[in-house]
Image: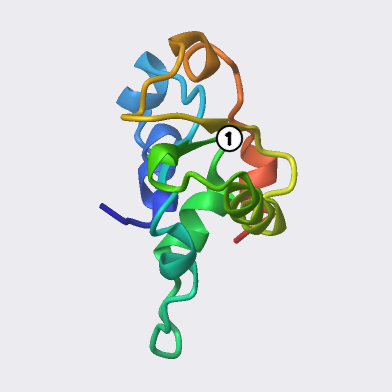
Amino acid sequence: GLADPAPVAQTFFVDDDVRELYTLDCIVAVTDAKHLIMRLDDEKPEGVENEAVEQLAFADRVLLNKIDLVPEEEELAKIEARIRKINPDCPIIRCQQSQVDWKQIIGVGGFDLDRVLGFE
């Protein structure tokens, strides 16, 4: 589901016990290639953030999932371009059924607190 990633990430820094035991390595946004543009274009009431945009902005990696449901390369390129408008430097990993090499998303040291603080 869609949720604001900031409070989840914040847990790693404000809770002493969590901070002592764990490190936030990477924020991964899993997107649905077929429906992402529709979610990005959702009209929200004034003062309400678009969660899809927030997740992409905070992401250190984006899984562009269900690419089999968007068979046209041109459409996939347009979707990736929308992602790049929100998060230009984030690697986008195309996949089906969220199957990716774990080395692309675990142990990558992708999280950058200074970058995230720039959003707030």
User: Is disc 1 placed on a helix, strand or loop?
Assistant: loop
- In front: 11, or 101? 101
Q: Position of residue 54 (x, y in %)?
A: 50, 59
Q: Position of residue 102 (x, y in %)?
A: 44, 12
Q: Tell me what residue is drawn at x 66 percent, y 38 percent.
A: 90
94 in relation to 70, above or below: above
Q: Where is residue 49 in the image (x, y as percent from the top left)?
A: 45, 73
Q: Tell me what residue is drawn at x 62 percent, y 38 percent.
A: 113
Residue type pointed to by label 1: Asp
Is residue 2 in sight in this rendering? yes
16 in relation to 65, above or below: above
Q: In which quarter of the image is the C terminus?
A: bottom right
In the picture, measured across the screen, residue 57 lies left or right of residue 30, that is right
Q: Of all residues shown, which one is farthest toward the front?
A: 72
Q: Where is residue 91 in the image (x, y as percent from the top left)?
A: 65, 32
- In front: 26, or 15? 26
Q: Which residue position holds label 1?
A: 60
Q: Tell me what residue is drawn at x 61 percent, y 25 percent.
A: 110
Q: Tell me what residue is drawn at x 33 percent, y 25 percent.
A: 18
